[in-house]
Image (cartoon, coloured by chain):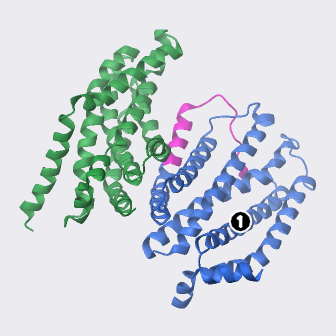
Chain colours: A green, B blue
Amino acid sequence: MSSGASGSIYGALLRRQLTLALRRPVQLLNPALFFAIVIVLFPLGLGPAPDTLSMFAGGILWIVALLANMLGAETLFQGDYDDGSLDQLLIAEQPLYFLVMPYLLVQWLLSGVLLALLSPLFALMLGLPEQGIVVLMASLALGCGVMSVLGAIGAALTVGLRRGGILIALLVTPFYMPVLIFGAGAVNAAVDGLAFAPYLAILGAMFSLALALGPVAISAALRISADS
Amino acid sequence: MWTFFHKLGSPPWLYGIAGSILRWLLPIAVVALSVGVVWGLLYTSPDFRQGNSYRIIYIHVPASVVALAGYYVMAIAGAVSLIWKMKMADIAMLAAAPVGAALTFVALLTGSIWGKPTWGTWWVWDARITSMLILLFLYLGVMALYEAYDNKAAAARACAILALVGTVNIPIIYKSVDWWYSLHQPASIKFTGESTIDPSMLYPLLLCIVSFYLLFTCVLLANMRVEILRRERKTGWVRRLVGES
């Protein structure tokens, strides 16, 4: 097969994933709605005092983003597994390693970049100091990339199971912890006026590592799920 | 060399050899553990700052060390099972998970009991405690994933992948938790370094660590034997074995 034709399969997958997502606009906004609803829980639980909320805002926003990302991961391969298009992917002559990249990219755009773009709104609601907002967006964009890859590993491992929901949370949360540490760390450093660039650099390094090694695990897991 | 490797894949052979290793190793482990624990608990001098409460170290430290090593045993067995499709390796992997999880739990529990008289609190978000807690979740994750699959052959391979992903992530998790802890600079008491331990306290500790390793091996082998019997319950050799005894 010529390189042009094999190039087009990635483009086609990308278009397909985007089209599928955009055809269900409400589902597309679900992570953002979830984000907004959980944000409401914190003032209700911790009390509405602006000082307390703004002190914890960076951590709260990051934890909620983490949960939203995790919930979004669950359905990543579900539709394709159910209708058999996953099997087509497995027998395609292109390496599965690259074929899962469009999935990861779309997942990152829709759950990560979208949340990052909406996050200033929620940051203002919790009273996150203004100097933290840009760093929050940047750290969420990078960190959600890492979490999308890790979540996809969990999704690939559990796609054949009927009750994957809570299991995927148990599987991937330990792996999300370093991302949370550096993501929330970046925001808190920016709020305190400290250097935040090292945190973002480490998040970027994690993203590169996840992107390089993650698809190996994802493709191996997808093959197992398709067999079972 | 290769015949040995092929024999490893044979359930009756592995069942037999594990049995004969156990026959020797289990008494040694029990004796070593008893000597180490009695030596540590009764015949060492009390610590000048912590008094007698430090003696829990003879359970706590060996459990933590072996709990961490157990994850690598599990992950290496998982890798062997994925690469060479060796069924006996995934039995070893699955046998290691509950033992490792139990040891991690023992380490956390004894640490918490030790923390009460020493630090005045049951739980501190110390870097090492947090890392051990995450390790427990990693073990439980592998066990939960195995339970969730109906097809146990696929379950073993999925667990092997999860264990390997965990292996790549453990150093990252440990480093970042370490780093997170040092950044927070909590007001609580710092964990004093273990390197300053007196030789009279160190020798029983080393004996305890060795005997925990032996005990881990014994329980691992016993677990593997049970799993081999369970999987091979329909075969002739197991029927003959059960019929004989």
Q: Quadrant of residue A202?
A: top left
Q: Which residue is mark 1?
A: B219
Indicate whether residue A134 is drawn in magenta.
Answer: no
Is residue B53 found left or right of A152 in the rendered image? right
Residue with the most extreme right position = B43
Circle 1 Cα neighbour tier, 10 Å, few/some/many (<14 / 14–19 / ≥20): some
Q: Nearer the viewer, residue A169 or A149?
A: A169
Residue A110 to residue B16: above or below: above
Indicate whether residue B178 is drawn in magenta.
Answer: yes
The quadrant the N terminus of chain B occupies is: bottom right
At 38% from the left and 58% from the top, the residue drawn is A225
Q: Nearer the viewer, residue A218 or A90?
A: A90
In terms of secondary structure, what is the magenta stretch mainly? Answer: helix
The quadrant the C terminus of chain B occupies is: bottom right
Residue B10 to residue A171: above or below: below
Residue A217 position, x and y percent, is: 37, 58
Is residue A47 found left or right of B205 in the rendered image? left
Q: Quadrant of residue B199?
A: bottom right
Q: Amino acid at mark 1?
A: Val
Give the magenta range.
B173-195
Chain at tag 1: B
User: Can you see residue B79?
Assistant: yes
Q: Nearer the viewer, residue B68 or A173?
A: A173
Is residue A41 found left or right of B106 in the rendered image? left
Residue B39 position, x and y percent, is: 89, 59
